[in-house]
Image: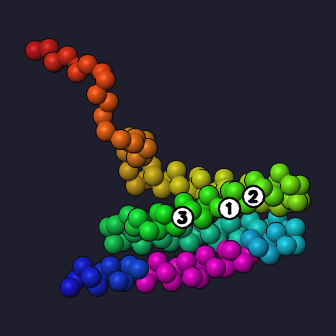
Amino acid sequence: MQVYKAKTERGLMVFAIWSALGTLGLMLIVEGFARDGYTLALAGTLGIIAALGGHVIVNAVFSTGFTPGETALGLTAFGLLVLVFVLSVLTGDVSTSDFYAGLTLFAALTSAFVIYLITRHGLRGAFSRFHVGAQRTDLPPPPPPET
């Protein structure tokens, strides 16, 4: 019963953080793009990063990582944002301040992701997260250690 309660509490805390800080950050980013205001978009980026930091803190308190659903949502949202940004740049519909605001957002999110991986798993563990598949079988086995 305690595991279920802790899981529910964690979910509620994550939802509350993203509802408050994430929504505020998103609104400021959209307003910054609408007004060509880099400062507003930067404030929105800080709101998104604060929400991500709060999420990481909640994960640390409950000794968990991101759930598969949270990871999928985050990567999908990031990918769609990059796609929309690149298409906007290619069609020429982006002002200079919007361009820099978008670059700042993606640089901040990418940096936060790398910092999270390093602090959560260490340098070696973070690198190991990107290994895909089983070990290679086409290489000969290593020689036995000398005694």
Which residue is most to the left? 147
First to last magenta residue range: 12-28
Q: Earlier in the sequence, mark 3 or mark 1?
A: 3
**For the stretch drawn in magenta, what is the main secondary structure?**
helix
Secondary structure state at the residue bearing disc 1: helix
For the point 22% across and 21% down, the residue is: 141
Q: Tell me if residue 20 is in the magenta stretch.
A: yes
Marking on residue 74? 3
**In percent of the image, x 85 and y 73: which residue is there?**
34
Query: If the image is split into quadrants, where does the C terminus sit?
Result: top left
55 and 92: which is toward the camera? 92
Give the answer, above or below, for where 140 lies relative to 93: above
Report if the CB atoms under discs 2 and 1 are less than 8 Å apart: yes
Side of 134 where 123 appears, left or right: right
Q: Looking at the picture, how far across and down is residue 98, in whole percent?
A: 83, 61
The kind of residue tagged 3 is Gly
Depth check, front residue: 9 or 54:
9
Q: Which mark is residue 135?
A: none
**Residue 62 drawn at (x, y percent):** 33, 72
> Disc 1 designates what residue?
81
**Residue 102: percent from left, percent from top:** 75, 59
Residue 92 is covered by the magenta coloring:
no
Question: In the image, what residue occupies the spot 30% across and 21% down?
Answer: 139
At label 2, the amino acid type is: Phe
* Residue matched to label 2: 85
Q: Percent position (x, y) of residue 64?
A: 34, 66
Q: In front: 7, or 116?
A: 7
Q: Residue furthest top?
A: 146
Q: CA distance from mark 2 to mark 1?
A: 6 Å
**Residue sitting at 40 percent across and 46 percent down?**
129
Alpha carbon distance from label 2 to label 3: 16 Å
